[in-house]
Image: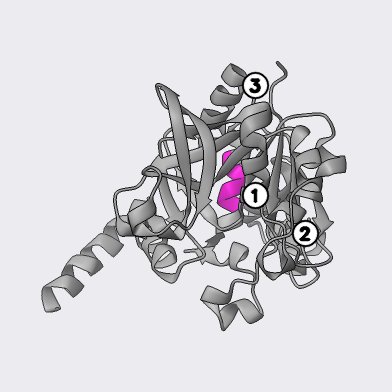
């Protein structure tokens, strides 16, 4: 089986939970301290062996494209000032992989966003990551899910065990057989009621898919609001060719949620070799006053 070298990152959502700032700035490039969340997802893909990345945007998210596009004028000015570290930093944004873009012309749902990648992925398997789900682990999550795909040869749904009542906010896997961290997925229940949870395995924004997803999307019925949802597509695929839920390791931050974003800011700041210790002392002093 060929190594997975392509990734697709849909960034078409409106970011309503982050209004008013998302009226002007896409939620995917809101910073964690000084680096957009989308940049970290791109790095996860690169660290998983990806060489080609497609970012799905809409006409209101040109700033995402601008971020990953070279800026020769700025780089030349920084170089002339002797600020070579900054030049290296900027070049790294767009040189890690071949990054391209496609537009989702109408907001027709998550499955439609994935369908925009059909020409890009062709017959190859690919990673799919939502542009506002940041997951940090010792081993990149996409690389973990690739192991499941190489083993079973069917679409892989990235899941984590979820203890709290907030599990009702997610798609939850209904499972049968299990083999270690892999579970045969019978269906995905989107936002189940707390008294009807099929398992404690929540889908958290990472997948491995292949060309079979496109025919399944073409057969996906239209859902609420006239949109086509990837959950419905995956439910069609659970019987043929089959889907496996793969439990990955990693700390997940919901960057579409204000609390998740603040949490990421704090934890990443604490890890900073530049000012982490200073920030830690500040937090201790602040906590002592509360």
As drawn, the label of residue 76 is 2
Q: Which residues are magenta?
A: 39-44
Of labels 1 and 3, earlier in sequence is: 3
**Residue count near mark 3 (Cα–Cα under 10 Å), binned few <14, some 14–19, many ≥20:** some
Q: Nearer the viewer, mark 1 or mark 3?
A: 1
Q: CA distance from mark 3 to mark 2?
A: 47 Å
- Magenta stretch secondary structure, dominant: helix
Q: Which residue is mark 3?
A: 153
Dot 2 falls on a residue whose secondary structure is helix
Q: Is residue 99 visible?
A: yes
Q: Which residue is mark 1?
A: 232
Q: Position of residue 25 (x, y in %)?
A: 64, 74
Mark 3 in CB contact with mark 2 (< 8 angstroms):
no
Q: CA distance from mark 2 to mark 1?
A: 49 Å
Q: Position of residue 238 (x, y in %)?
A: 61, 34
Going by the image, does 109 lie left or right of 40? right
Q: Is residue 271 magenta?
A: no
Q: Nearer the viewer, mark 3 or mark 2?
A: 3
Of the pair 46 and 273, the residue shown nearer to us: 46
Mark 2 in CB contact with mark 1 (< 8 angstroms):
no
Of labels 3 and 2, earlier in sequence is: 2
Residue at the image position 68 percent from the left and 35 percent from the top: 209
Residue at the image position 81 percent from the left and 58 percent from the top: 72
Residue 82 quadrant: bottom right
Going by the image, does 280 lie left or right of 47? left
Q: Position of residue 111 (x, y in %)?
A: 72, 52
Residue 73 quadrant: bottom right
Q: Is residue 139 visible?
A: no
């Amino acid at each position: 089986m060929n190594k997975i070298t392509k990734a697709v990152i849909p960034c078409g959502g409106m970011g309503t939970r982050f209004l008013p700032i998302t009226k002007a700035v896409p939620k995917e490039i809101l910073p964690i301290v000084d680096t957009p969340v989308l940049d970290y997802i791109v790095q996860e893909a690169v660290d998983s062996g990806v060489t080609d990345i497609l970012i799905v945007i809409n006409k209101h998210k040109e700033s995402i494209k601008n971020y990953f596009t070279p800026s020769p004028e700025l780089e030349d000015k920084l170089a002339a000032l002797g600020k070579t570290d900054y030049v290296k930093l900027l070049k790294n944004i767009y040189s890690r992989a071949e990054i391209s873009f496609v537009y989702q012309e109408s907001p027709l749902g998550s499955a439609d966003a994935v369908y925009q990648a059909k020409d890009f992925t062709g017959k190859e398997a690919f990673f799919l990551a939502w542009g506002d789900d940041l997951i940090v682990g010792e081993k990149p999550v996409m690389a973990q899910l690739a192991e499941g795909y190489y083993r079973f040869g069917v679409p892989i749904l990235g899941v984590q065990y979820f203890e709290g009542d907030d599990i009702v906010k997610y798609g939850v896997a209904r499972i049968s057989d299990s083999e270690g961290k892999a579970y045969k997925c019978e269906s995905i229940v989107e936002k189940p009621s707390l008294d009807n949870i099929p398992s404690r395995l929540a889908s958290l924004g990472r997948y491995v898919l292949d060309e079979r997803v496109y025919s399944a999307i073409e057969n996906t019925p239209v859902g609420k609001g006239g949109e086509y949802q990837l959950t419905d597509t995956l439910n069609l695929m659970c019987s043929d060719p089959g889907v496996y839920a793969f439990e990955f390791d990693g700390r997940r931050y919901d960057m579409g949620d204000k609390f998740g974003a603040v949490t990421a800011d704090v934890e990443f700041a604490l890890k900073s070799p530049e000012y982490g210790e200073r920030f830690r002392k500040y937090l201790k002093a602040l906590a002592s006053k509360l």
